[in-house]
Image (cartoon, rainbow, N blue to C red):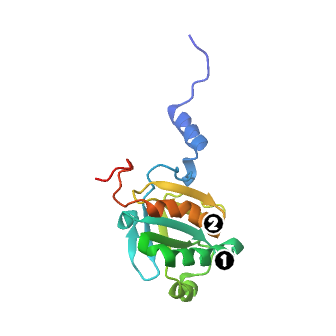
């Protein structure tokens, strides 16, 4: 006969949830080289879009804030790269964080940019702790890059260049179909 401590199953499950970060709404970020989590956005021009709307395109989710110095340097770089590469299938969604200016205050900036500014974002992309934070999703919906810190001109090319040269319908085998 065992006289050890017996914990109720609920207590064990709760402890496991806390340990893995799944309790209290804390979600770890998505995994690179795995399917990207779905997301839903509302753009400044009122369109409601999800990941499925960008099938076959390379998508950058850029989380930024107006008070963030590195974000202020990165946004013009992203805009310039987008203007040069959007015809190759590039989409950039700039998501201003809640502690930034209001959507009404950001509207003049949104009108100046050709990349899409987002006023509402919903998706399981973890807790954004540092700004800017970028997620890059390839043409097949696989998360290929996730990092905090602003892109440099060289960094944008290193991450996005190879993804933009991939064929939207390539099977990854190197053979044409």
Pointer 2 or 1: first along the chain: 1
Q: Residue furthest right?
A: 69
The local crowd at label 2, few if under 14, some if 14 to 19, many if 20 or more residues have their Cα within 10 Å, is few
Q: Position of residue 124 (x, y in %)?
A: 49, 57
Q: Position of residue 46 (x, y in %)?
A: 41, 81
Viewer can see residue 29: yes
Q: Nearer the viewer, mark 2 or mark 1?
A: 2
Identify the mark at residue 154; answer none if there is no mark: 2
- Residue 2 in which image quadrant: top right
Camera-side residue of 42 and 92 = 92
Determine the CA span between mark 2 and mark 1: 17 Å
Q: Is residue 53 left or right of residue 115?
A: left
Report helix, strand or loop for mark 1.
Answer: helix
- Residue 54 in which image quadrant: bottom left
Q: Position of residue 31 (x, y in %)?
A: 52, 49
Which quarter of the rendered picture does the N terminus lie within? top right
**What residue is pinned by disc 1?**
72
Report helix, strand or loop for mark 2.
Answer: helix
Camera-side residue of 98 and 61 = 61
The residue drawn where x is 56% and y is 36% is 11
């Amino acid at each position: 006969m065992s006289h050890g401590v017996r914990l109720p199953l609920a207590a064990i499950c709760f402890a496991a949830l806390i340990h893995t970060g799944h309790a209290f709404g804390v979600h770890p970020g998505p995994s690179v080289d795995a399917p990207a989590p779905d997301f839903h956005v509302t753009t400044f021009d009122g369109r409601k879009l999800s990941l499925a709307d960008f099938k076959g395109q390379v998508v950058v989710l850029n989380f930024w804030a107006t008070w963030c110095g590195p974000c202020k340097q990165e946004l013009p770089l992203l805009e310039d790269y987008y203007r040069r590469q959007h015809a190759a299938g590039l989409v950039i969604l700039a998501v201003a964080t809640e502690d930034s200016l209001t959507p009404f205050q950001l509207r003049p900036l949104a009108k100046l940019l050709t990349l899409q500014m987002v006023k509402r974002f919903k998706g399981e992309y973890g807790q954004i702790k540092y700004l800017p934070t970028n997620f890059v999703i390839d043409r097949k919906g696989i998360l290929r890059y996730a990092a905090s810190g602003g892109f440099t001109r060289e960094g944008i090319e290193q991450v996005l260049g190879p993804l933009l040269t991939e064929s939207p319908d390539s099977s990854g085998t190197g053979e044409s179909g």
